[in-house]
Amino acid sequence: MEDVSNPYETSELLGEYMLFHYGSDEDVMPWSNGPKEGLGFAVRTVSELIDPLTLGADSLGLDVGCAVGRSTFELGRFCSRVKGVDLSVSFIDAANRLVEHGSHEYRFLEEGDCFREAIASVSSEQRTGVEFEVEDACALPAQLGPFDVVHAANLICRLPRPDLFLDNLASLVKPGGQLLLATPFTWLEEFTPRENWLGSGNSEEGLARFLSPFFEQEERKELPFVIREHRRKFQFSMSLGSRWRRLGS
């Protein structure tokens, strides 16, 4: 039975995120005059932010708030072993089915109560060294790290206590390692109490205050993304992408 109290455990949202992560460009954005630059976000948050030149052959990666896992598989292109974690049981179940079987059937909303069937697929090469498990980003196990790369996309403004996650990053990233973040700073009190927001109009500065004692920012870029709700309704947003280098040796 679905946990309807958690919006990330509904079958409709699972289909929406499967499409967001694995859907073809034509299925995600069927309109020629739509914002095509927002496609492929789950891949681009890794490929456009990571510094592969400083990663060794045995690098370890962690994807926090991985949802249904496309960014985790992308991180596996640069790391020998990668762990994806998310609080949603249905998202992690779907990601694990992809690891085990290489494909997973899902359906996404067309209009009203009409859905379309689709299949997500991941090659055997992409699945090698990748694993998924349910974890709370605000209470990650102390023994989880450290990693050469930690990635978190569109996570911070969906946490009840983003400070707990941010305070833990210094222990999750090895000295000299890299932190890849993307966030649109879409603060909503249904997810994050107002007193826990990093800022209101100045969230980028708030993020830097949390990270600067242990990290140095190396990269900053705007990363557009588009999420299809149905064939005539979409969310278009701009996520702030950044790469931070863990200080120390």
Image: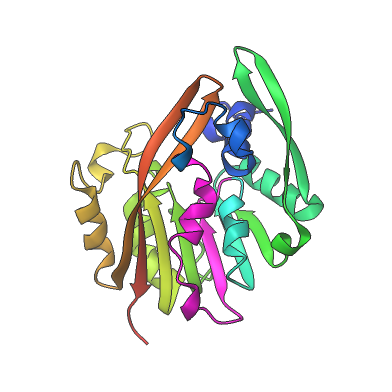
Residue at left 57%, top 33%?
28
Where residue 218 appears, as percent x and y from the top left, is 32, 69
Between 56 and 160, which is closer to the camera in this rendering?
56
- The answer to whether residue 121 is visible is yes
Residue at left 67%, top 15%?
114
Q: Is residue 28 left or right of residue 126?
A: left
Task: Let me know if residue 56 is in the magenta part.
Answer: yes
Where residue 79 appears, as percent x and y from the top left, is 59, 71
Quadrant of image for the N terminus: top right
| 137 up-or-down from 27: above or below | below
- The answer to whether residue 5 is visible is no
Residue furthest to the top in view is 112
Point out the stretch of residues depicted in magenta.
38-67
Q: Quadrant of residue 220?
A: bottom left
Display colour scheme:
rainbow
| 175 up-or-down from 100: above or below | below
| 28 up-or-down from 100: above or below | above
Residue furthest to the front in view is 32
Quadrant of image for the C terminus: bottom left
Where residue 131 appears, as percent x and y from the top left, is 67, 60
